[in-house]
């Protein structure tokens, strides 16, 4: 007897005027020459290449450069903790060999007694090309200006005796987010620590920092996204935002946050009014354990996962028909062998059923019809995306075969 197939169809994305259907691409060791599936951190160089690193032991390369077509791999002798681009597009990284490295066509290695831990992260390069490094094992901050090294901690500066989780630059000063001692303005002239006791901060735990458009510094505390303009504070609550490691902005003014929490994690999009969450349960993202996220100049969202490779999401694929006014039917439910699709307009369509890893399992061209059938009898159990496209529409549904 053939297995019964139960298909639950959910309309994933709606918009009152234009439908925005993200497209997804997943790069992993089974479908590309990416050296590993566990990404730690990423950044872009001056020509738009994406650099990614991996921080675990082994003989595979721990650094890769992706130009959109090919992964070029480096460094098998040490793992890489963090990577960042400076204003010239040169790449800076820290390694388990307790060294700082710079890449601008060739690798330059810097060592110092202050780099006495294999866990040197996060790192940041300010506009004056000072490199700031957090020594995680010994809880202090290092400044390297290309020649001299300086150590800062709670004994010789305003830094609290707390772990530093994130770094950024705002209004000509370095800012630090701490694990339990608030937000620190580490200025050349003035040093200030903002906490729940002297500011509107809802928590003393600052998970992520990013300078926004204009004079704003954006941050994430558990349960809140917020910004500070030097005088005023603004908070946006979201109970699912219990962790974060990256804040990014796209050209449309939307804010993107990566949340690595195993159960409530994913990619959070905030348009200053509404939240959208893309997670393993409702999108092709293969895991909620996301360790970094970057948005490129074309608004593609790049997602570094722990164990499931590199994910590229292109969020702004628009169609012309309003979903709310369209009567589309996908049935029966349950189904045994065939999935019947009924559309309101006779047209030429392309229909695909795509796995959550991006593999196209079924592809069919439909000519001058509004009703058609897809044979799903050979699909394995699991979640899939049903995509229906024509010159004027782009539908995206999630289907589950059990």
Image (cartoon, rainbow, N blue to C red):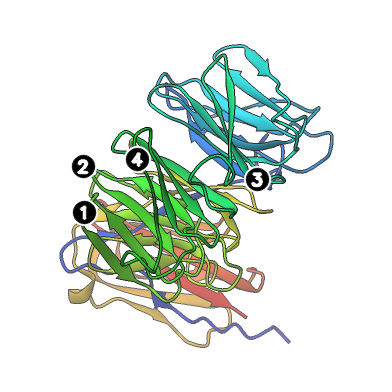
Between disc 4 and disc 3, whose residue precedes? 3
Give the CA separation, mark 2 to mark 3: 37 Å
Number of on-image labels: 4
185 w.r.t. 145: above or below: below
Give the CA separation, mark 4 to mark 3: 47 Å
Measuring from the top left, give residue 317's x and y in whole percent: 30, 51
Disc 2 on helix, strand or loop?
loop
Judging depth in this view, the residue of 266 and 149 nearest the camera is 149
Q: CB of mark 4 within 8 Å of CB of mark 3? A: no
Give the CA separation, mark 4 to mark 1: 15 Å
**Label 2, on which residue?**
214
Measuring from the top left, give residue 55's x and y in whole percent: 71, 42
Between disc 3 and disc 1, whose residue precedes? 3
Between disc 2 and disc 4, whose residue precedes? 4
**Label 4, on which residue?**
190
Q: Quadrant of the N terminus?
A: bottom right
Between disc 4 and disc 1, whose residue precedes? 4
* 2 vs 4, front mark: 4
Q: Which mark is residue 231?
A: 1
Disc 3 on helix, strand or loop?
loop
């Amino acid at each position: 007897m053939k297995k019964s197939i139960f298909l639950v169809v959910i309309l994933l994305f709606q918009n009152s005027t234009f439908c925005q259907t993200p497209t997804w691409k997943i790069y992993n060791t089974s479908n590309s020459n990416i050296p590993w599936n566990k990404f730690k951190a990423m950044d872009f160089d001056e020509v738009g290449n994406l650099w990614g690193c991996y921080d675990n032991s082994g003989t595979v390369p721990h650094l890769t450069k992706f130009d959109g077509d090919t992964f070029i791999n480096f460094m098998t002798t040490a793992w890489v903790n963090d990577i960042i681009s400076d204003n010239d597009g040169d790449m800076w990284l820290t390694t388990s060999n307790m060294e700082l490295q710079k890449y601008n066509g060739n690798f330059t290695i810097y060592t110092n007694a202050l780099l006495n831990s294999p866990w040197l992260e996060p790192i940041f390069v300010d506009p004056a090309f000072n490199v700031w490094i957090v020594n995680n094992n010994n809880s202090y901050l290092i400044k390297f200006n290309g020649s001299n090294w300086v150590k800062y901690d709670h004994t010789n500066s305003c830094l609290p005796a707390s772990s530093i989780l994130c770094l950024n630059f705002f209004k000509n000063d370095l800012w630090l987010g701490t694990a339990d001692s608030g937000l620190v303005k580490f200025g050349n002239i003035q040093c200030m620590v903002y906490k729940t006791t002297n500011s509107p901060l809802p928590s003393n735990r600052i998970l992520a920092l990013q300078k926004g458009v204009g004079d704003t510094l954006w941050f994430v505390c558990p349960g809140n996204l917020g910004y500070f303009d030097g005088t005023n504070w603004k908070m946006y609550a979201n109970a699912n935002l219990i962790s974060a490691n990256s804040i990014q902005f796209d050209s449309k003014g939307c804010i993107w946050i990566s949340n690595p929490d195993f159960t409530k994690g994913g990619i959070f999009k905030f348009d200053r009014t509404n939240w959208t969450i893309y997670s393993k349960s409702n999108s092709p993202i293969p895991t909620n354990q996301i360790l970094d996220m970057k948005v490129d100049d074309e608004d593609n969202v790049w997602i570094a996962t722990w164990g499931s490779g590199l994910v590229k999401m292109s969020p702004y694929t628009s169609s012309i028909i309003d979903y709310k006014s369209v009567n589309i039917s996908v049935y029966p439910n349950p189904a045994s062998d065939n999935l019947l699709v009924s559309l309101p307009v006779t047209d030429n369509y392309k229909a695909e059923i795509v796995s959550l890893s991006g593999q196209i399992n079924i592809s069919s061209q439909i000519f001058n019809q509004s009703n058609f059938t897809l044979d799903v009898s050979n699909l394995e159990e699991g979640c899939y995306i049903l995509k229906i496209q024509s010159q004027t529409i782009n539908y995206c549904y999630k289907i589950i075969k059990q």
